Amino acid sequence: MRVPIACVVGWPIKHSRSPVIHRFWLNELRIVGDYVIKPVEPDKIAGFFKTFASGSFVGCNVTVPFKENAFAAVDSLEPAAKAIGAVNTIWVEDRKLRGDNTDAAGFLANLDQEAPGWDRYGGPAVVLGAGGAARAAVWALVGRGVAPIYLVNRTVARAEALALRFGKGVRPDDWAALPQLLDGARLLVNTTSLGMEGQPALPIDISPLSPHAVVTDLVYVPLETPLLAEARKRGLTTVDGLGMLLHQALPGFERWFGRRPRVTPELRRAVLETMVN
Ligand code: NAP
């Protein structure tokens, strides 16, 4: 019997934590299989996807900068991938490539696990950033009925384009409007890369937020970003980005290896151990 092997494809990709997550689950569920890193140079990615279905992998995760190439390359799309316009999970079915985007599900599952009831009031929410991660987060929030969603981005045109895609509950704006938009907001989501190791902190004052607000950051290196540290100091509920990374991995594992794993404190610890150096 063929040993199932999945991979993560990206460029550059040396620091991906995905092998740690999937190997932890393979080991925990006693499944004979593997998950490896597959660096592919940008000019070779089209060829990689073209021959993927006849190759040796049962599927793959797709990371930066290939999520849109994957969207164009697969034979069929799950609804989330279609709506978000990007694919991060591929599996082979009847020698055809099927593509999904699990970032939105991972984003919601993380909030549900770490801040149960976060969507009780339905909004308002403020989302910072309008890149690929924001597309997934906004689609997820719209699907949960959160409104209004104020979408704030340095390049306002990008926020406007994203708002057009997701309907009138999503309202694009610029950084200057933040003090008013944050006033009484129930949820604040950072999807920009600000706050990440080596990047400046987010230059915002979160004091206008509702005292019952939940603050989540998609950045997970460091685990507690300056935004989350400030929110915690103010007594707000905080949710870090590592949980999203773990939850978004789950649907791919289930497709490739046939068992549904769980996101547990033990998994979190195993991944955190790889982040200390
Ligand atoms: P992306 O498509 O490149 O978008 C980056 C976003 O950050 C854009 O909105 C960009 O604004 C903004 N930005 C960058 N530098 C800025 C600055 N100096 N000032 C203001 N805004 C700035 O990246 P992405 O794929 O969306 O990823 C964004 C972050 O989410 C990354 O840190 C990534 O690691 C994280 N992420 C985490 C998970 C998870 O599972 N936890 C999943 C996906 C992504 P402009 O449009 O104006 O350039």
Image (cartoon, helix red, strand yellow):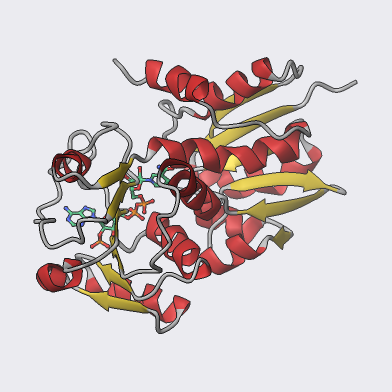
Q: Position of residue 232 (x, y in %)?
A: 20, 40
Q: Residue at x 41, y 34 (%)?
A: 12
* Residue 95 or residue 209, whichever sits in front: 209
Q: Residue furthest bottom?
A: 168
**Quarter the C terminus occupies:** top left
Q: Position of residue 70 (x, y in %)?
A: 59, 53
Q: Residue at x 67, y 46 (%)?
A: 90
* Residue 234 or residue 140, whichever sits in front: 234
Q: Residue at x 12, y 63 (%)?
A: 208
* Above or below, comparing residue 160 to residue 234 in the picture: below
Q: Is residue 162 left or right of residue 172?
A: right
Q: Position of residue 143 (x, y in %)?
A: 53, 68
Q: Residue at x 43, y 48 (%)?
A: 111
* Above or below, comparing residue 267 to residue 150 in the picture: above
Residue 28 visible? The answer is: yes
* Residue 104 or residue 125, whichever sits in front: 125
Q: Position of residue 179 (x, y in %)?
A: 10, 68
* Above or below, comparing residue 149 to residue 264 in the picture: below
* Above or below, comparing residue 214 to residue 200 in the picture: below
What is the quadrant of residue 183 in the picture? bottom left
